[in-house]
Image: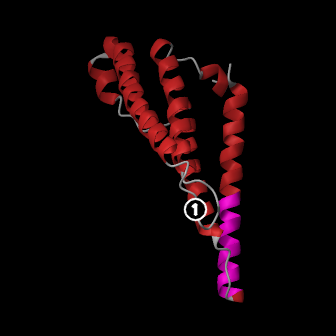
């Protein structure tokens, strides 16, 4: 279905991680070896970390790798498990909808705030939340109606 999206998301996360490591390593070498530094590297690596965390949350949600304690419900209420899963996905939908709305509003409010070091708008921090919120809304809506919808994408 959206296999290209999930693969590209994995590659983006990997690229951002490599970029962050490179920026921080170069900054450390320059600072301690040559008494200089790359001033924008701190802000760029922080921006990269925000994007890695938010996109990583999307990947973990899609792969169903978030922490869940299901022993109680599966042992005591085995017949109610499908309904409980749908309720859980509905709660997730409400929470990520709030994430999306809040991040989207903050993103729109901060497009004019330009960083002195990088020249980038500070709205890029909030864009990560808005994009991850939108993707998690998509995942949770699909999972409410079909819990195993992404299983074929995962090779299971």
Residue situated furthest left in the rendering? 76
Where residue 17 sits: x, y (%)?
66, 55
Total label count? 1
Where residue 137 sits: x, y (%)?
49, 26
Residue at left offset 58%, top offset 58% = 114
| 26 part of magenta stretch | yes
Q: Quadrant of residue 80?
A: top left
Q: For residue 64, say whether it is visible.
A: no
Residue at left offset 68%, top offset 23% = 2
Residue at left offset 59%, top offset 68% = 42
* 6 lies above or below 16: above
Where residue 21 sits: x, y (%)?
66, 64
Q: How is the image coloured?
A: secondary structure
Residue at left offset 64%, top offset 63% = 118
Where residue 100 sits: x, y (%)?
46, 34
Q: Nearer the viewer, residue 123 or 71?
A: 123
Q: Nearer the viewer, residue 24 or 112?
A: 112
* 47 lies above or below 39: above
* Magenta-highlighted residues: 19-33
Q: Main secondary structure of the magenta part?
A: helix
Which residue is under mark 1?
115
């Amino acid at each position: 279905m959206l296999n290209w999206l999930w693969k590209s998301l994995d590659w983006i996360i990997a690229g951002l991680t490599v970029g962050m490591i490179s920026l921080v390593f170069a900054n450390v070498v320059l600072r301690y070896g040559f008494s200089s530094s790359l001033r924008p590297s701190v802000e760029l690596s922080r921006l990269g970390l925000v994007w890695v965390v938010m996109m990583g949350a999307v990947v973990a949600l899609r792969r169903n790798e978030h922490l869940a304690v299901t022993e109680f419900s599966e042992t005591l209420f085995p017949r109610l498990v499908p309904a409980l899963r749908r309720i859980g996905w509905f709660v997730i939908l409400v929470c990520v909808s709030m994430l999306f709305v809040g991040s989207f509003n903050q993103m729109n409010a901060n497009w004019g705030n330009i960083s002195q070091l990088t020249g980038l708008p500070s709205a890029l921090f909030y864009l990560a939340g808005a994009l991850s919120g939108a993707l998690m809304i998509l995942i949770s809506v699909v999972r409410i109606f079909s819990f195993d919808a992404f299983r074929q994408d995962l090779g299971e």
